[in-house]
């Protein structure tokens, strides 16, 4: 396979529909900065990281320095204070590199920093947010439990308050990104004896607290460059002020998920962009029957479909970001974006892999890595099916979950 | 089947993703005016018009009065001078009624008035445009020929200039909307003896000129409320000034098609909206197994998919309209929008028909009428396949037409 | 559009996978006989019949003479006594002509003659079956009611037995094929005061009985060459022996549906074959960009997909027929075949229509007629969705209907 | 995740359409023997093999003993002499385990033993076939070259005959299954100075011949339990009798591919069966919102679609096998089967993975492993696109390859 041509195919394929015209100059500048980092530092190592099953820890400091962690939170807490659209573009660029890297940033920003920002005390914010923004602390988010993937209200983990106001936590969490490298976990638990959703509260748990244990999940065939763990909490004692004081029932972690899903809707577009760019580039250089395969109708239809789906996904996330920045977006809208964009990204990755023929199974190219990664993203933070039912309920006024 | 509930389901289903937030107040007002006309005057008669195979001629004066004909052309020529986005919203609303009505308006505005505006002399513009805007004249557009549907450069129709500067036209045109009711036809012909694209010029042909004949095409199972004709030109003599002086090669009629396709991209969204609204409404009122079918997962997935595709189509056309108003859109972008939106609209119509069960085959509901109509729209003004190859060429730089 | 070439494309396109090798010589001979009738008598008139909305009554005698009515019932009752596979091939050939014609034959054979055969007294069999086989009587089947399309157990029609043993029927039936031309209706009703399924019995109702009324359903955009009626039964008095004595609860009409669905699974393959043959033929003769469109990759993929789906549908019905002839088939298997074959046939019809471009909307070609017809077939005798849930239940052991 | 229930779900899900009724008792017995081996020996180790990227060499002797290698070749050469259908069922069962294992057997049987049987001298047959059947020798097949994946006639590898009748081979081959473990390679090369297809001949190359080198391909994200190598031949000297004397032009290796594709069409059904069984089993045991997810409509539709596609694929391969055993099948028919079955198998694997939610990314389950493997199978031995064009050509008589 000869080297891909060096002309700037990316800009061409990625913006024939001129999405850039709907971005501000600042937004484009932020995106381009992260893009350069991803192109120069991340992509060159991702194939090997994926095969080896390791997260590129060595790049965390630069990620922090670039301001990507909690980038939409205020500057007064050491964050970049960016708009939702700019934040989304950052997620997009990171996932052009790898879904595992974007997942790392999503968890740190939307699932650890955001709840501390939204539900934490001023002391908690001042202590944790700057450290998390700088990646001095890595965080993880403990909501999902083994038997309650799509139904968090079934949660079993329990926090019992002691006479002295301190807490004891018991339970197990699963599918926890960053779990084994985290310094701090935001853990959700039912409090008291209630089995009701409304008793759910969040807790900040230093991961070196006795009784806290994280175990790597083995045998993953997706997100191999991301750490995924099970958490076990056995009589984990926490001080009274470990609770997030403004967290209040199941709706609090769901608000975090809404933040994270928003970022995911952008992120997967990045994976799709990487694939489309690879597909276009390959189609122009790979010769079969004496011409580049990009000159055959079958491949042109494939590329046209991929490009169209990508463009539409970009418009969805951009519109959503504008609504969010206007203080006016709904979880249902986020469901639409997360569901659609994961769906089209998985298809784009698969079609790219197929366009690449036998080469498409190699880690040297990005298509199959993205294709495998995106299956996780398709499933986590609300599966496709769950979001179908959220949309269905919004459209009909009728619940069909049970 | 009980009457559908009277509550305003339309607004709900049609804008859960808050596309309205991206429209100006004026744009929404224009849209709502046309919507009211369509809901009150057009939709109540369309089922019967369709079954009877007749265009609702009685509504033409009000269409003209509402300013929908050539709505984006300047006020100095008797037109409404609206933005491209407002124009698009009008097309959307008309096609909520019926694709045939929107086709009528598209032909009049984008394929008759636009070329006179863009390629005509000042005299032609002053004479024709106000009359066309007021529907005193109905126009048609003669480009397609029987054997050259997707390849207009194969055109055989010929205009030969006489010694006195006058012209004689000979040829045949096919699939001509409004052909049998038109007062004036914009006809494209090769000039002189050239077989080259560059010899193509446009002519304004009064349809009462001797030698001009329009024959209705029989047996249509789509666009039954629209007139479709074959045109035959046998030694049609025209004065020297019948030519559109600034028309110049194949690119001139292609510019008209770009205008029309832009409007189509919006129009089919209207058909899709009508279907989705019908589907949502039906799903809430139709009871099976003791509950509204909208409460079943299968129907919710169907509705979620339809809604998502509609939203994306809307964002595509809106983004395109903004680019067009900024003087900055490309034919390739129009191809993407026309291709995608026709595709999703046909699917939405079919899924609605299916959700409606047996009732879905009746003209009393709109789904099957839209489903049948949209097959024509899918095909005309560049088939899906042709636009695939336009996109493929833009993405790869390689032509795969032949 | 030049005439299609006269070479025998049909055999080629229809049997590249050599399905014929799995048929007996007799089965092929029966099929070929019906095929000839359909090609010579039926297809030439169907376009006009469809546009005019009329059933070709003039062909009924020849249909009867060919033995297609109740063809799988025993010779002792004046029927042809054919195998299930031969019966299926007949349905296939009829629907190559039009779904309305096959529907006529399905109703007569599987929904009128079959229940009389299976649940009737010897007297009823000897009286009715030969007359129905010869089309001296036309029959219809009254099961579906306006509000219980997919849930026949909700039936409201009621038969009350009088002191003298005679019956009085009241109720309404909808979507009744042949309703307005029938001499005799097989009507299903709950008996006594029971609301239970088990009280359902069948009755033979001469349509000239006072109180029996059939009204044509207007505004159909599908099956336009088929009669579809509403039936109203107002105090319809029937003698005691009008009941089908061996009918016994809802399972009896469901057994009829199983017979009919089996035939449908074959029938729609015929419509699909007609479309594929039209598509192949058109693709070889229609020239665009200086070559037959069949030589372009886009069309070859379309044809390859259509052909593959057709072949698979054929194998499904053939395997099912062999099981049926071995006395060993299940309603779930019939659901699979009906559901799949309707689905692929509607897709094949749509793709053919699209391949035909603008010509594809004309009744002169068969694609759009089949496309519209098949929407009814997709829906009747158990919608696609209902059969999904039947299959789902069989696979999981869990019911998801409610 | 609790253990899956121990009841025999497999038989249930796999044969609701009673495909078994079309098999002979002997065929079922052979299948069940291999199934038992796969269930007991292969499946328990495949997850680990895949993660570790190793072929389970320890199972090769038992594979040989079971007679699966070249199972359809005659007993006189030490093979099992089975019918094509029985051979297909064996491939199906092996790929229920893993596509890599089936690939191993396909290469050994269809690409090494078959050409020696079909094109070899009696001496070659007597020497090699029994050893290959017993796995004393492992073989590989060298046809594909780096730049000629879908176009083998572009082959560059060259065999030049010396004055003494011996041969010198030079060239490179890629994507060679079993390459690094093979004792013997069947290598295809152009002979003399010809660039013509007709000069292609096959050679038996002992892999310890100086100049022969096999290099493992690294970074595979598919078929990780299979060895895939590049071969380099640098002045490889072979005796005069190394040539397969009856090989004769490109059609000889294409005949091998037809054999292999036939087996693949069966094999991928096995992967699909494994997935469907896993999906059904999981859906019955995984509880969400207080009931097994198999009781939700969304999952039932998914299962119904998967099952229907599987059934159709099974009928395709079975019909093809019957034709093959009757000495009457065509490469086009094999293309249909290979293309369709790979396509549906990849979809079934993906849908299973999604039904399994987060668990679906783990090697502990088989869905994602099969999903990744099948991408290779989709591509090798003629990509989906190449087979589309083979079918398109057969249907239209027109070539669209170039």
Image (tube, coloured by chain):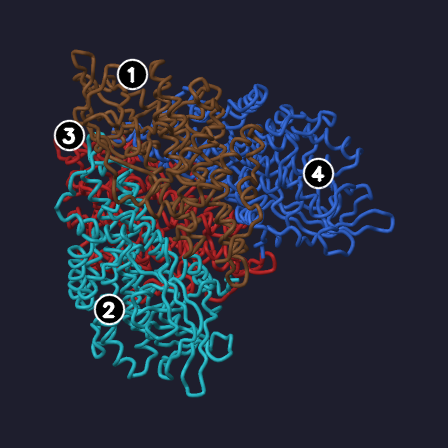
Chain colours: A brown, B blue, C red, D cyan
Give how far apart the Cα atoms at labels 1 and 4 are.
63 Å
* Secondary element at image label 2: loop
The residue most toward the bottom is D164
Q: How many marks?
A: 4
Q: Spatial distance from mark 4 to mark 2, Cα to Cα?
A: 72 Å
Measuring from the top left, give residue C155's x and y in whole percent: 23, 32
> Can you identify the residue that label 3 sits on?
C194
Looking at the rendering, which quadrant does residue B360 occupy?
top left
* Label 4, residues with CA under 10 Å away: few <14, some 14-19, many ≥20: many
Chain bearing mark 2: D
Foreground: A46 or D256? Answer: A46
User: Residue B115 has which mark?
Assistant: 4
Instruction: From the image, state whether disc 1 or disc 4 is nearer to you.
Output: 1
On screen, C202 above or below D72?
A: above
Q: Residue at x 45, y 30 (%)?
A: A65
Residue A248 got which mark? 1
Q: Mark 2 points at which residue?
A: D69
Element under label 1? loop
Residue A244 as seen in the image, left or right of residue D31: right
State how far apart marks 1 and 2 are (Cα). 65 Å
Image quarter where the C terminus of chain B lies is bottom right
Question: Dot 4: what SS?
Answer: helix
Discs 4, 2 touching: Cβ within 8 Å: no
Marks 1 and 4 belong to one chain: no
Q: Horizontally, is D337 left or right of A235 in the view?
A: right
Which mark is nearer the camera, 3 or 4? Answer: 4
Label 3 to label 4, Cα distance in Å?
A: 72 Å
Circle 3: element type: loop
Look at the numbered discs 1 and 4 and tell me whether their residues touch, using CB distance below 8 Å.
no
Q: Are marks 4 and 2 on the same chain?
A: no
Q: How crowded is mark 1: few (under 14 residues within 10 Å), some or many (20 or more)?
A: some
């Amino acid at each position: 396979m000869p080297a891909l041509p060096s002309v700037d195919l990316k800009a061409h394929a990625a913006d024939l529909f001129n999405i850039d015209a709907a971005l501000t100059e600042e937004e484009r500048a932020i995106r381009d900065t992260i893009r350069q980092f991803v192109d120069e530092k991340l992509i060159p190592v991702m194939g090997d990281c994926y095969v080896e099953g390791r997260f590129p820890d060595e790049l965390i400091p630069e990620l922090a320095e670039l301001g990507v962690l909690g980038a939409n939170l205020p500057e007064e807490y050491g964050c970049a204070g960016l708009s939702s659209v700019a934040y989304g573009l950052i997620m997009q660029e990171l996932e052009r590199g790898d879904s595992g890297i974007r997942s790392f940033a999503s968890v740190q920003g939307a699932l650890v920093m955001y709840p501390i920002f939204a539900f934490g005390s001023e002391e908690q914010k001042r202590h944790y947010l700057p450290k998390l923004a700088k990646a001095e602390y890595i965080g993880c988010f403990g909501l999902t439990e083994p038997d309650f993937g799509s139904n968090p209200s079934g949660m079993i983990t329990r926090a019992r308050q002691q006479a002295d106001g301190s807490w004891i936590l018991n339970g197990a969490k699963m599918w926890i990104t960053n779990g084994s490298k985290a310094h701090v976990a935001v853990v959700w638990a039912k409090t008291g004896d209630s089995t009701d959703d409304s008793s759910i509260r969040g807790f900040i748990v230093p991961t070196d607290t006795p009784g806290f244990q994280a175990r790597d999940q083995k045998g993953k065939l997706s997100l191999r460059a991301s750490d995924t763990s099970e958490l076990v909490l056995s009589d984990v004692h926490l001080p009274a002020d470990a609770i997030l004081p403004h967290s209040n029932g199941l709706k609090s972690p769901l608000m975090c998920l809404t933040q994270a899903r928003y970022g995911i809707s952008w992120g997967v577009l990045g994976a799709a962009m990487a694939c489309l760019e690879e597909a276009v580039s390959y189609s122009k250089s790979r010769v079969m029957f004496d011409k580049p395969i990009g000159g055959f109708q079958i491949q042109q239809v494939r590329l046209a479909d991929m490009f169209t789906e990508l463009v539409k996904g970009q418009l969805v996330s951009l519109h959503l970001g504008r609504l969010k920045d206007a203080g006016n977006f709904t979880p249902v809208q986020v469901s639409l974006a997360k569901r659609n964009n994961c769906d089209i990204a998985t298809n784009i990755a698969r079609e790219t892999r197929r366009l690449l023929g036998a080469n498409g199974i190699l880690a040297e190219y990005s298509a199959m890595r993205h294709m495998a990664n995106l299956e996780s993203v398709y499933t986590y933070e609300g599966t496709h099916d769950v979001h179908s039912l959220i949309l269905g309920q919004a459209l009909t006024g009728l619940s069909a979950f049970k």
